[in-house]
Structures are given as structure tokens and as C-alpha cells.
Image (cartoon, coloured by chain):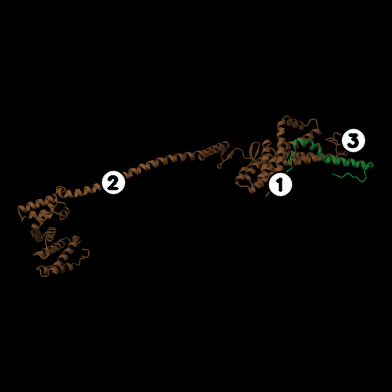
Chain colours: A brown, B green
Amino acid sequence: MLCYQCGYDISTVKSVCPNCGAAVADYKKIVYLSNYFYNEGLEKAKVRNLQGAVSSLRQSLRFIKENIPARNLLGLIYYETGEIANALSEWVISVNIQPEDNLADAYIALLQSNQNRLDKMNQAARKYNQALDYCDQGSNDLAVIQLKSALSTNPRFLRARQLLSLLYLQAKDYTAAAKELKKLRSVDAANTTTMKYIKEVEEEGGEMALITLGGKKVGGEEAISYKNGNETIIQPTGGMAPSLDGTVIPGGLINLLIGMLVGAAIIGFLFMPGRIQSIRNDAQEQLKALSEQADARNTEILEKEEEIGTLKSEIAALTEEVAMYTGEDGKSSAAETLEQAATAYLNDSSSGEAMQLFAQIDPQVVENTQSASFKELYASLESRLKPQMRNYYYNRGVEALQSGSSDPAEAVKALETAYSYSNTGEDGYTSVIYYLAESYYQQYMRADTDEKENYVSSLAKAKQYFTEVVEEHPLSQHVESANDRLNAIQAFGVNLSGE
Amino acid sequence: MINFEEELKKYQPSLEVGDVQDAIYNQDLTDVSDIVVRMMKDGLEGERGGKPGMTIPKL
């Protein structure tokens, strides 16, 4: 420390310069204050609180303008924040104050050694000023363009970036503002203007803006910075991200995975849809062709099925017709049976064989046949055999009934045949009915007790024929017996309503 | 909520390299030590019959 009057070293003296007698006590206090603020500025600069450092260093220079370290550091901070002219100004003054052994000399020489760079930085300042003019004119879009241009030339130009952030905030483009503010924070950690804009983004911006804002860069590493009292705490987040279970995943690996996912997404969204559409079109064409072929074949099948149905109908009709002549399973056909019956009749007109054969012929078959000769022969034989057949079967039925067989089914069958060949009013008709009724009655009576319910229908038919005898032929000899049977049936109490 | 117009007023034009010389010449480099020294000198001159009534204020 030198005396302000004579330049004598007064570091060790207290109040009066031993050389010139000047009072130096107050002057020394001023020097101490200047140094105090310089130290404070230096501390702030070390933690990248550049705005605070500028404030302290300016304060330091207000006390002692010759504080060369303070002035040089102030110039360095101006240079760091892109204020190249201000930096140059401080260094020039510094060199003027102390021409010898001054660090500012080296700074100026460094700037002047790269004239091109100096011009670019000066150009950035000019563009910033132009942007300010645009802002005053309300042409914010042009201002943004100028500022972007200025920052491409001088990326550390703090004021330009702050103004750009403000313009983004004004345009409510919070994500873009957050991107700029993140860069600002990496240059000047505790700048009040930057912090104010960050707060605005945090309050007004969305989630994306907050994500974009993220941490700040310190020494090339991502870091989160916050203030605790007077201390600025910088917490690096690094490239190693701890997972939930505490293991550490390398950041590079995460980036690689994200890159792969993005690549896959690009392929998925840009290339695959076209390819998928092409494959779908081909498949649809093939499907259409196959459908047409299938339709044609279906139509053909339907035609064939229709034809088969017609042919089957024809075959069934022919088979039925042929069956009448040929017979099935070794049995004689109707025509053959008729022929045999006729032959037996011709041999013996009262032969039971002729009547038995004739009875085997189904009258329905005769009715449906196309052969006129067959019908004629059947009718002729029927007219000759019919009277004999009634008697023949009546006798057989009564004989079977009277034989006392446990199953009078044969009697029932024979008497039904006799009944079918009987005509109302002819002699013996009442007897045929009576014995037919009696055969049914016996069928029920002779059945075992536990099987009687299977013969209720027989009892019903017996009641029907006994009633016919009593009501239709009251003079018949069988009326009394028929009445007895009806009374007996009544006494059984069997429900015959289902008959 | 930031008032854009008010905020804009805080932004001053940047000094360009060509203006550095003028800026240096126009800069008032007077510091506290200059004032104190001048005051002390004025005080001494007063004691020697200079400007009457001048006293050196205590810092």
C-alpha cells in the first residue's frame, strides 16, 4: 500500500506517512474496504455468481479505482458474459493505471491476436442493439431473429440471451424460454433476472418446460443448483442414474437405449404403415380372387346337389315301383304273391293257401301300382275269394280263441281279417263283430296282472265292438253276452278314455 | 407475471468496440479515495488560511 501523496510504502504505518506526513489512517480504511469487496467479488466469481461478482467488484473500484486485480477481474467477467467492449474498457483503464506487470495486458493482447473473433463479438453486440430497437418498435419476431444470430456468433452473450428468453416468455413459448434459461443458468448461476424468468416458466410453463429446464451444466456435467442461506449448493446429477433398487445404470447405456427406441419408433411410424398397407392390399386382392373362385364352386355344387336331389327322387320312385315286382329280402313281391294266390285258387278254389297268399297283398300297393293288368287280376281274385275269406278267417279266429291259448293274438289277427272282408247286414256279420270283441276281451283278461296295462287298448276295442253288437244289432243272439261283457268292463273301473 | 414493457426498459444498449475509447474518456473514475484525499487537502488548506469553515468529515 502506497501513500496517496508521496507514494511511500505505508503498509506498516498506522496514521501518518513517515515520508511526507500525510494522514493515511482514513485512506488505509478505504483501501481495506476496496480489498474486502474485491475478495467478495472473487468468491462470487468462483461459484459463477457473476452478477454478484460484478456488483462487488464495482463497489471495490468505487473505493479505490487503482485496484488492478478488481478491475481486471471485472473485465474478465464482462468478457465471460459476452460484453466484450466493457471488458476491453476495463482492461484498457487497468493498463493505463498500471502499465507494467499487468494481467490486463495479456488479455488485450489475446483479444487483438484474433481480430476476426473480436469483429464477430462486436457484430453480436451490434445485433443485440438492433434487436433492442426492434423490440421498441414492437417487431418482436425480427428481434428474435437478430438475437438468435447474435447468440450464434457469441453464445456467452448473457444480456442477448436474457432478452431472447423474455421475448419467448412474452410469446408464451415457455419450452423455448426454458431452453434459453437453462443455458443462462450455466453461465451465471444466480443472476436475478434469469431467476425471475425461471420462476415465470415454473409458474406459467407446462410440464415440458419444466423438464426442459431440468438441471444446469457445471464443468460439462448436469447439475442442480439451489441456495441455502448465503451458500450456493451445486449438486451434480452426472451421467450415472440410480435406479429404484439402488443399482447404477450408465447414462450412455440409457442414451443408447433411448436412441434405439427412437429409431424403432421412426421405422414404426414412417416406414411400416406403407409396407403394411401394401401387404394388406395384396392380401385383399388374393382374398377377392379366392372368394370369386369359391363363389363359382359353390354355385356349381348347388347345381349338382339339386341335380342329385332330383335323381334321388326319381330313384326312390323307381325303387318303390320295382319293389312291388321284385320284393325285398327274399320275400315275394305283391305281383308274385298275387300270381301264387291265383295259381293256388285255380288248383283248389276252396284252398286256404290261396286265401292266405291273397291276404298278404297290401291293398295300398295295388292302388298305387301303374300296372292295369295287375289291378285287374287282383280285383278278379278278390271278388272270388272275399266271401270265402271272411268265413275262413272267422273260423280260424274262433278256433284259436276257443283253444284257450294264453295269447289270443292269432285269434285277434284272423278275426280282424274276417272283419275286413265282411259287409254290414250280411249273415254272420254280428258273429264276426262279437267274436272280434271277445278276442280283444280275452287278450286283456288272459294277460298277466302286471302286463294288463299294456292291453288297455284291447279292452277299449272290445268295449267298442260289444257296444256295436248291443246297439246296432239288438236282435242278435250275442246281445246278452255282449251286455254281460260290457257290465264286466264297467266293473273293472279301467280308464279307457285314451282309447 | 412479468410486465414485458417494464422489463424491456431494463435492457440498455451494449457497448460496441468502436465506442470503447469514448466510454473510457467519458467515464467518471473518481473514487472515494479521491474525494477523501481532496477533502483532507482542502482541510489542510483551510487550516493554512484557505477556504474558511471547511472541516474534514470523519469516515
Mark number, residue A20: 3
Q: Is label 3 in a helix, a strand or a loop?
A: loop
Q: Quadrant of residue A384?
A: bottom left
Q: Is label 2 in a helix, a strand or a loop?
A: helix
At horizontal 28% and vertical 46% (from top left) the residue drawn is: A305
Q: Amino acid at mark 2?
A: Glu
Mark number, residue B7: 1
Mark number, residue A305: 2
Q: Position of residue A341 (x, y in %)?
A: 9, 52
Same chain assignment for discs 3 and 2: yes
Which of the pair A314/B27 is nearer the observer? A314
Chain letter of mark 3 equals: A
Mark number, residue A421: none
Q: Position of residue A402 (x, y in %)?
A: 9, 61
Asked whether the viewer can see residue A205, the reply is yes
Contact between marks 3 and 1 (CB within 8 A): the answer is no
Question: Alpha-carbon distance for marks 3 and 2?
Answer: 138 Å
Q: Amino acid at mark 3?
A: Cys
Residue A497 position (above or below residue A140): below
Question: With A160 as the anchor, is A325 left or right in this view?
Answer: left
Q: Amino acid at mark 1?
A: Glu
Label 2: how many Cα within 10 Å (few below 14, some 14–19, many 20+): few
Question: Alpha-carbon distance for marks 3 and 1?
Answer: 53 Å
Contact between marks 2 and 1 (CB within 8 A): the answer is no
